[in-house]
Amino acid sequence: MSRYRWPSPPSTGSSRWRHVVVEAPRVTVLAGGIGAARFLAGLQRVVPPESITAVCNVGDDLDWFGLKVCPDIDSVLYTLAGVEGADGWGVRDDTRHTLESLRALGGETWFGIGDADLATHLFRTGRLRQEETLSEATAALARARGVGVTVLPVTDDPHPTVVRTADGDLAFQDYFVRRHAAVPITGVSFPGAPTARPAPGVLAAIRDCDLLCVAPSNPLVSIAPLLALAEVDAAVRESRARRVALSPIVGGAAIKGPAAAMLATLGHDVSALGVARMYASLIDLFVLDTVDAELVPAVRALGLEAVAVDTMMVGAEGRERVARNVLYAAGFLD
């Protein structure tokens, strides 16, 4: 059993801090895909799952032959259920008979979906056609998978991520999967943000938690879509929680995905320090990997607390270790 404690308030005596004793912290994680899923899997080994909420990106969602596919939500659900594929997406040891048959018919197969994965999308789409919201369908999937963490889409409304390129605007999966992230980008936009409303429970999860974590996800296409909703951004800024971000960039490279290339193309510093600059107005503490320990003073110069710990989430033990490191750095673990 983990021993929890409440972190000491800053010497400034900021009124933003609550002074209460908690048995286990209420933790909310702003989540993208694989990096967030692995962090959450480690976190649920340290904190009771019912104390954890994941607010998930839906900008990657797509329509696949009429089915609603939510890659980031599914990566989180599969990983928390312990059935994720070897690469962090899809279902472990899944077959692809449907995809192979579709290919034989001449159908488009650039987005690889396995048979067990397909069942998830059929289930979700069926619930949506029965006029359930995405939040309700996600909760049903979580229950069916035995997931104790509360998994929320950031919004039930359409909120796509659009990647701007020299070839025109592309939906995220078209850019990332179909074109292998090989098309030079000129920007990222979220056209649904002005009208999308936070899903039920999202704002309360951000405002009322004890620890708010920005997962080690792509800042541009995983975290930015969440913050593109003005109410979500305001809730993060107003939250009285301890606010922590983990760097998805280690040693000048992305742990997974196109983050490094996208950051470089759009003029950002491809380093943990560069990510810290992007989050500086939103958080209290920035967590870097030990590989980047020399950047700690520069991060602190931004007005943030900073700590370098092992952030490599290899295997269940590695994920738990990272979660413990973050909780300890944030002051919640003895």
Image: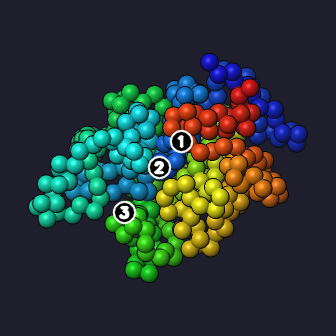
Residue 205: horizontal and vertical position, in percent?
Answer: 56, 37
**Looking at the figure, which quarter contains the C terminus?**
top right
How packed mark 1 is, by other alpha carbons closer than 10 Å (few <14, some 14-19, many 20 or more), is few
Look at the numbered discs 1 and 2 and tell me whether their residues touch, using CB distance below 8 Å: no
Q: Nearer the viewer, residue 228 or 188?
A: 188
Q: Is residue 215 above or below residue 4?
A: below
**Label 1 amino acid?**
Val
Is residue 155 visible to us here? no
**Label 2 amino acid?**
Gly
Residue 275 left/right relative to 227: right
Q: Tell me the colour scheme of the image.
A: rainbow
Element at badge 2? loop
Element at badge 3? helix
Q: Is residue 54 above or below residue 3?
A: below
**Label 3 amino acid?**
Val
Look at the numbered discs 3 and 1 and tell me whether their residues touch, using CB distance below 8 Å: no
Q: Which residue ends up furthest to the bottom in the rendered image?
A: 166
Residue sitting at x 49%, y 67%: 189
Residue 107 left/right relative to 281: left
Is residue 296 visible to us here? yes
For disc 1, the marked residue is 314
Q: CA distance from mark 3 to mark 2?
A: 14 Å
Q: Nearer the viewer, mark 3 or mark 1?
A: 1
Q: Which residue ends up furthest to the top in the rendered image?
A: 1
**Looking at the figure, which quarter contains the N terminus?**
top right
Residue 318: horizontal and vertical position, in percent?
Answer: 57, 37
Q: Which residue ends up furthest to the right in the rendered image?
A: 11
For disc 2, the marked residue is 33
Q: Which mark is residue 177?
A: 3
